[in-house]
Image: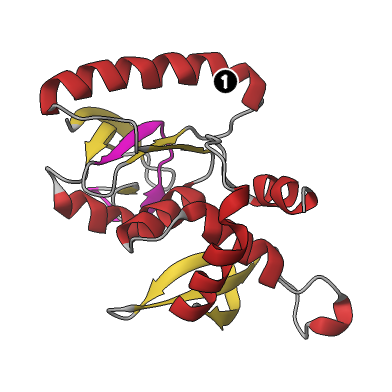
Amino acid sequence: MTRTTVEFIACPVCKHQSGFTTYQSINATLDPKLKQQIIDWELFKFYCLNCGEPRLVCYETLYHDMENRLMLYYIPAIDSREQEQYRIEEIFSQIKQVEGDRYSNSFDTYNFRIVSDMESFIEKVQIFDAGYDDRLVELMKFILAPKEEEDIQFSYDHMVFTKVGDDSYQFMFIYENRAVASLKFSEEMYEHFKSEYSGLLDDSYFVDEAWAYAMVSKT
């Protein structure tokens, strides 16, 4: 179920206060337009009604995609995964009970994920919307990323999976919040990683670069 509240935010430029809708939970199956607004970064954008100044507003929200069996919790600025673990497990347990009763859902095959930054939140929405496993995508990013200075002609901070056009995907290299290069994502490469690394996949809530490093270290 999608749940919202309205907050009033003061514009950082003109100080005018405008109403802004925040989403405590998002059901992308029942409200599919919200999924595209997330992918376009629009759902978290505040625009001042007085001067039009845009601002990105980060807030905690739960994303539920019944069709792709994903429960994704966005919690900005997690200080400690261990600190959050108990609270998150309790929240997910309550969700399973409430949502399961409402929609007769079985959560045995669901993916439960947690992210702490908006880019990762949007990335995972796109990964599951495309029908891919985020664990394999993270392993692809980690293994395919150039590690040595002589292997790369540009600086980058991290890689991100994103949609380009109507039906193609790429890994974008991001440096100081700008895309500086790209690497084509292919079905053939994805299937190769699926056959090679399926045995490494676990049910961690946190699937990111640190998780990929830990998985690869086991091989």
Is residue 78 in the magenta section? no
The residue located at (55%, 72%) in the rendering is 192
Q: Residue 49, can we see it? A: yes
Of residues 12 and 162, the one nearer the viewer is 162
- Can the viewer see residue 177 in this picture? no
Q: Residue 57: x and y, percent?
A: 40, 42
Classify 191 as above or below 151: above
**Whole-percent x, y for residue 24 in the image:** 29, 29
- Describe the colour scheme in one phrase: secondary structure
Q: Position of residue 32 (x, y in %)?
A: 16, 51
Q: Is residue 43 left or right of residue 126?
A: left
Q: Quadrant of residue 100?
A: top left
Q: Residue at x 16, y 54 (%)?
A: 33
Q: Who's the residue at 50% across and 51% down the image?
A: 120
- Crowding around mark 1 (Cα neighbors within 10 Å: few <14, some 14 to 19, many 20+) is few
- Locate the N terminus and report the quarter of the image it occupies: top left
Image quarter hosting the C terminus: bottom right
| Residue occupying the point 48% across, 54% down | 134
Q: Residue under label 1, please give it.
A: 84
Residue span colored magenta: 49-65
Amino acid at pointer 1: Glu
Verify whether residue 63 appears in magenta: yes
Depth order, front residue of 107/147: 107
Whether residue 93 is situated above or below residue 148 in the rendered picture: above
The residue lying toward the viewer, choosing from 126 and 61, is 126
Q: Residue 52 appears at what percent x and percent y?
A: 29, 56
Q: Secondary structure at mark 1?
A: helix
